[in-house]
Image (cartoon, rainbow, N blue to C red):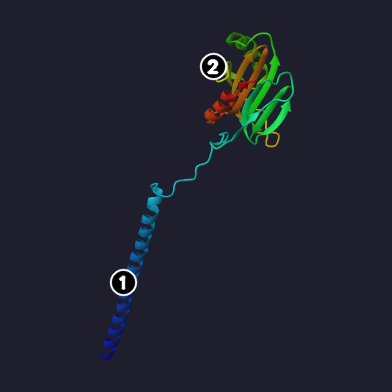
Amino acid sequence: MMARVHVFGVAGLVLAAAVTAGCSGATSSTGSSSRSGAASTTASPHGSGSGPAPTETNPPGDIPDNQAFVTYRPTGGAFTGFTVKVPEGWARTSQGSATVFTDKLNRVQISATATSSAPTVGSVTHQIVPQLRGQVAKFAGPKVSTVTRKAGSAVLLTYQGDSAANPVTGKVVRDAIARYAFYRQGHEVDLVLSGQVNADNVDPWRIVSDSFTWK
């Protein structure tokens, strides 16, 4: 009789331990689930877009809104009777009779020639466009028109073409080009503005083309 009581007591202790372990496991599982739910709730607002806005950056080729401009006055060459504003700090080089200002993917080229006749939509279409087609890689989409700037009327040619390969990376970008031809008293000044296609440079290029002044 005493032996049976002893066995029953052991069995009771084992059963009690099992129940205790089960309760402990349930509590642990519940706690784990609660922590997981809390973590999910914490992450949710960020996923829904309520977190800090990403820092804005200018796309490649965009000229910054705070870009300063300085006046360029030619000091040599066939004709020096004009001025034009160019972006401050850009690298300046000479390419033949042209003066070129560059920064990253953007370029301003200025050249002056003596000519007896003013450029027209017809002369640019039938003479300049064929020349460029043979010089510019993948030349496309030429459009010629007459526009008015502060210095007076100009013949504007817009087109696209591939840039020269970067000497370091070999990268080639697609450029959008605007060529303004200004004329007065036997002198033509060509102002060529180029930058990567889709870059938002309308305002900076307007500043440059509107700044052209005869002297």
Mark 2 or mark 1: which is in front?
Answer: 2
Up-down relation of residue 85 to residue 126 (above or below): below
At 36% from the left edge and 59% from the top edge, which residue is drawn? 38
| Residue 177 image offset from top left, x and y in percent | 59, 23
Residue with the mark numbered 1: 23
Q: Nearer the viewer, residue 40 or 149?
A: 149
Write down the quadrant of residue 103 in the picture. top right
Mark 2, Cα crowd under 10 Å, few <14 / some 14-19 / many 20+, is few
SS label for mark 2: strand
**Alpha-carbon distance for marks 2 and 1?**
85 Å
Q: Nearer the viewer, residue 70 or 123?
A: 70
* The C terminus: image quadrant: top right
**What residue did someone put label 2 on?**
147
- For the residue marked with disc 1, what is the amino acid? Cys
Q: Check the image and name the residue furthest to the front.
A: 215
Considering every residue shown, the one lying at the far left of the view is: 1
Viewer can see residue 56: yes
Going 61% across and 22% down the picture, which residue do you hit?
213
Instruction: Determine whether, in the image, residue 97 is placed left or right of residue 124.
Output: right
Asked if the residue at tag 1 contacts the one at tag 2, i.e. Cβ–Cβ closer than 8 Å, the answer is no
Residue 207 coordinates in the image, percent (x, y):
56, 28
Label whose residue precedes the other's in the sequence (2 or 1): 1
User: Could you tell me which secondary element the residue under label 1 belongs to?
Assistant: helix
**Amino acid bearing label 2:** Val
Classify 10 Å Cα crowding around label 1: few (below 14), some (14-19), many (20 and above).
few
* Residue at 27% in and 83% down: 8
**The one of 87 and 15 positioned closer to us in this rendering:** 87
**How far across and how far down the image is residue 210, in percent?**
56, 24
Image coordinates of residue 4 in percent, x first then y, are 27, 86
State the count of labels.
2
Judge whether 130 appears above or below 70 on screen: above
The answer to whether residue 198 shows anywhere in this view is no
